Image: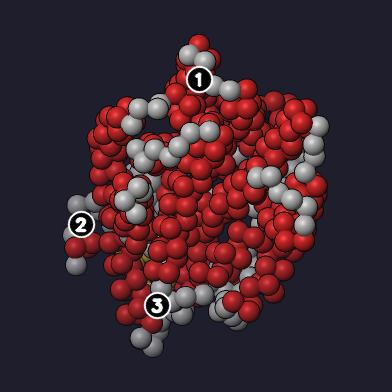
Amino acid sequence: MKKYRWSLIILTIIFLIMLLLNLKTLYVADDYVYRFVYQSPTPTDVIHPERINTFLIPYSMWNHYLLWNGRFVAHSIVQYFMQFNSKVPFDICSSLIYVLLILLMNKFSTKLSNRSDNAWILPLIFFFTWFYIPYFGQSVLWLSGSGNYLWMSIIYLGFILFNLQDNRFNMSNSIIAIILGFLAGATNENSGPAAVLIVLLFMLKRFIQDRKISLVSVIGVIFSGIGFILMVMSPGSQKRAAVHQTWETIQNNFTGIYKLTFGKWVWIYLLIAMLLIVAILMKRITKDTFWSVVIFLIGHMAAVYSMAFSPEYPERTFFGGVIFLGIALFILLYTILDDVKVPLVISAVLGIAFLFSFWPAYQDINLSYHQMQVQYHIIYKAERTKEKHAVIPLMTMQKSKYNANYGVIALDTPPQALMNQWEAKFFGVNQISGYRVNKSATVWLK
C-alpha cells in the first residue's frame, strides 16, 4: 500500500470526478428505448412494451440483431443496467470502468517500454483522455454511448493485453482466447477489428524475430473474426447500411476524416514524432519498443480511416483510435521520462488546464441535470392524474461536448415526436408535450 499510495490517491480522485459527472447525467435518448424488450425502433410499433430484465436480454438482443444492428455485446451491457429503477449502479460501475481504462493504458505503456510504474503518469493519461476522447459526454457519460465505446474498449484492450503474454497452449488459455476474441470482434465495426490487427502485427513481429506462432493467439484471432462477421452481417445492420458506396464517396470520406482528425490531433502527432526522435538520439528506445509504438499507431490509423467505408462517421466512433494513439504516446513518455519529478511538473501544469476545462463543462452538465429534474417532477406528477398528460419545459441548448445531451435527440414540442413517445412509455403516461422557455424565464428555479 505504501508503494502504491500515490497511485491509489490519484485513481481515487479520477473515480470521484467521473462519479460526480455520471451522477449528474440522467438518461438520454436511446436509454429510454432500451428500458424495454427491443421490438422496434419506432415507438408506435410497440403497443405493449415489456420491461427488460436479465433473463429477457437474449431475446431482446435477438430482436435488436434482426431489426437494428449487430452490436449485441454493447447493448447487452446497456440493457442490463436499464433494468434498474436507478441509474446509480451504472454510475458507480462506469466510473470504475473509466479508471480501469486508465490502468490498462498505463499497463500497456509500462509493459511495452519495459519501465516501472510512475504514479504521476496516471494523471497525464487521464488528462489525455479528458481532452482528446471525442464527444466525451456521448461516449463516456451517456449510458448507451458508454456501453458502445468506453465499456467496449476494455474488452478489445483486454484481448490485446492477453495476446501480449506468452500464453501456453492449454484448455484454460484456449477458452479465454475464444471468449475474449469473440467478444472483441463483436465490440464495434472499427475499433474491434483494429485491435485484432494490432494482435496480428504483434504475432507477425514475433514470428519474424523468433520464428514462433502462438496457437492461443491464432485461436483468439479466428474467433474474433467470427464475432466480427456475426456482428456486421446482422439483418438490421445490413438494412441500415444499404447505401451504395462509390469510390468518389469513399475518397470524400477519407478527405473529411483527415480534415476532422488531423486538426484535432496534429499536436499529438508532432509530440510523438519529437519523442521518437529524442528516444532514438538518446539511445533509450529498443527495437521492441519502437515497433510497439509503430503497431499502435497503425492500429490508430486503421480504427479511424476504416470509417471512410461507412455511410457516416460520427466523431464518437474514433474512441478506440484515440486510445491507441494515447498508448503509443505514453509508451514513448515512459521510455524517455525516468525522473519522477518531470511528469509531476507536467501533471501540475495540465491540472490547471483541466480545471479551466472542467468547470464550464460541469456547469453545462449540471444545468441539464436540473432542467431534466424539473421535467421528471412534472411527468411524475402527471402520471398520478387521470389524463396522464405532461406538459414540460424543453431543455435549453447544451454548450459543452462533455454534456451527454449535446447533439442527441431529445424531447420536442409535439407529443408525436420520437422521444416524446418513448419517454411517455418509459414513465407510463399517455402523452408528453413540450414548450420552449425563454432564457430569462425562472421556470427552472421553481
Looking at the rendered image, the disc whose residue lies closer to the viewer, 1 or 2, is 1
Residue at (43% x, 40% y) in the render: 117
Question: Which residue occupies 43% across, 76% down?
Answer: 85
Amino acid type at image mark 1: Arg
CB under 8 Å between callouts 2 and 3? Answer: no
Left or right: 375 with respect to 101?
A: left
Against 390, residue 148 (above or below) is above
Q: Nearer the viewer, residue 65 or 183?
A: 183
Q: Give the labeled residue for mark 1.
A: 284
Amino acid type of the residue tagged 2 in the rendering: Ala
Q: List x then y, in percent, for residue 423.
A: 47, 70
Q: Are marks 3 and 1 in contact (CB under 8 Å)?
A: no
Q: CA distance from mark 2 to mark 3?
A: 23 Å
Can you tell which mark lies on residue 243? none
Does any portion of residue 144 appear in the rendered image? Answer: yes
In the picture of the structure, the residue carrying the numbered disc 2 is: 441
Q: Looking at the picture, which amino acid does disc 3 mark?
A: His
Taking the view exactly as shown, the residue that stands out farthest to the bottom is 386
- Disc 2, SS: loop
Horizontal and vertical percent position of residue 261? 53, 29
Q: Quadrant of the C terminus?
A: bottom left
Residue 247 quadrant: top right
Crowding around mark 1 (Cα neighbors within 10 Å: few <14, some 14 to 19, many 20+) is: some
> Mark number for residue 389?
3
| Residue 45 in sight here | no
